[in-house]
Image (spheres, helix red, strand yellow):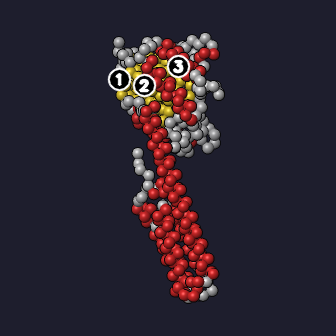
Amino acid sequence: MSQPVEGGRRPGREGRALVVVPVVWIVAVTVVDVLAPPHIHLGPLLVAAPALTPSFGGPRTVGAVAALAVIAQTVIAVVRDPAELFSANHEAQIIALVLVGVSLVVFCVLRERRAKELEQVRYVSEAAQRVVLPPLPRRLGPLRTASLYLAAEAEAQIGGDLYAAVRTASGTRLIIGDVRGKGMPAVHEAALLLGAFRVTAHRRDDLRDLVAELDRSVRWDLAQPGGTGEDEETFITATVLDIPDRDGQVRMVSCGHPPPIVVRDGRATTITARHASPPLGLGGLADTRHHLDAFPFAPGDLLLLYTDGVTEARDAAGTFYPLAERVTGWTGTDPDAFLRRFCTDLLRHVGGHLDDDAAMIVVGRTAAPHA
C-alpha cells in the first residue's frame, strides 16, 4: 500500500517544475507593473499565482507562493512610490492577497486530510478483500486459473460479487455468485456463503446436496434477528461447478446466475442450464429440487465464469457488453493472458468505468483427464 503524499499527489519532476509557473508569473507582473505608467496598476493580477498553485501543490507550496505574492505587492508599492504602500488601494490589494492565500491553504489542508482518509478507506477495503475474497490460486491440480474483481467504486474494493475454489479428493469445486444489493449487508452475505462453501464442499459428494446445504445456510442467516432479509427480499445468484481431475465432464448447478462460456479454438459456447434452480435464499419458497447439468471441458479449452456486472456493462450508447461475441476468435489458452485481454476489452467498451461490480474467472485444463 502506497503512502499518502502532500495534497494526495505524488512528488515528481513535473510537480516541482510547475512551481516555476506561479513564480515566473509573480516576477513578470512585478516587473511590468513597476515599469508601467503611474495610472496602470497590475498588482491585482498577482492573485492568479496562489490561485493556480493548488492544482499541483500542497498547503506548504500554496502558502509560500501566496507569501511571495504579498511580498511582490509590497515591492511594487515601495519601488513606484513608498507613500503608496499605505494607500487604501495597496492595502486593499495586500489584504485581498492574504485572505485568498489563507483560504487556499485551508482548502489544501482539508483536501490533504480527505486524501489521507480515502487512502485509509482503500487500505481497509483491500485488507477485507484479501480476507473475504482472495484471488484464486494459479494452479488447482490440473487446472490453471486467473481471477479478477473490478469494483465500480474506487474506494470500495469489495461488494456482493463472490467466488471461491476448493480442492477435493477427486477434483476442484468452484462457485461464483452475486448477492442482491450493495454495501456491508451484501459483503456479509457474500462472506457467509463463501465460508459455508469452503466447509461444505468437502462434505457433500453430490453437487446437488452441496447446493441445497448452501441454500439452507443463506436462508437460515436471513431468518436471524437483524438479518438482511428482514427489510427486503435478499438472495444470491450462483453457479456451482465440480471439475473432476479424471473426467472430462464438468458438472454444474445453476441458481439463476449468468451461464458459463467455454472457448474452444476461438469458438465461444454458452452453457445454458436446462433446469436452473432458484437463487440461493429463495429455495424455501417451494419444494426445490436442484438439477445437475454437464458439459465437456478438455485441454485447450477455457472456461469463463463471470457476474452480471460484465454482461450488463453498457457503452455510451447503452449497448450491453456482448461477451460471447467479443471473445469469439480469441485463440489463446493462457488464463492470465486471456483475462487481461478480457478486462481491457470490457473497460474499453464502457469507457473505463463500470456502473456495477464485476467478478471474472478464467479456467484452463493443463492435462487430459484419464480414468
Label 2, on which residue?
165
The answer to whether 156 is drawn above or below residue 277 in the figure is: below
Residue located 47% across and 25% down the image: 194
The numbered mark, 1 or 3, whose residue comes first in the sequence reads 1
Q: State the image coordinates of residue 130 (x, y, percent, origin top left).
A: 43, 35
| Quarter of the C terminus within the rendering | top left
The residue indicated by pointer 1 is: 141
Q: Secondary structure at mark 2?
A: strand
Q: Is residue 319 above or below residue 32?
A: above
Residue 220 image offset from top left, x and y in percent: 56, 19
Mark nearest the camera among 1 and 3 is 3
Q: Residue furthest front?
A: 225
Residue at mark 2 to residue at mark 3: CA–CA distance = 18 Å
Q: Judge depth for marks 1 and 2 and give the one in front.
A: 2
SS at mark 3? Answer: helix
Report, in whole angstroms, how far the alpha carbon at label 1 lies from the one at label 3: 28 Å
Q: Is residue 25 above or below residue 116?
A: below
Side of 3 relative to 179 (left or right): left
Disc 1 from disc 2: Cα separation: 11 Å
Q: Three-letter amino acid code at disc 2?
A: Ala
Horizontally, residue 242 falls left or right of residue 87, namely left
* Amino acid found under the numbered disc labelled 1: Gly
Mark earlier in primary sequence (2, 3): 2
Q: Which residue is mark 3?
A: 217
Q: Mark 2, residues whose alpha carbon is within 10 Å: few (<14), some, or many (≥20)?
A: many
| Picture quadrant where residue 242 is located | top left
Quarter-of-image position of residue 250 = top left
Q: Determine if residue 268 is in view.
A: no
At 50% from the left and 33% from the top, the residue drawn is 359
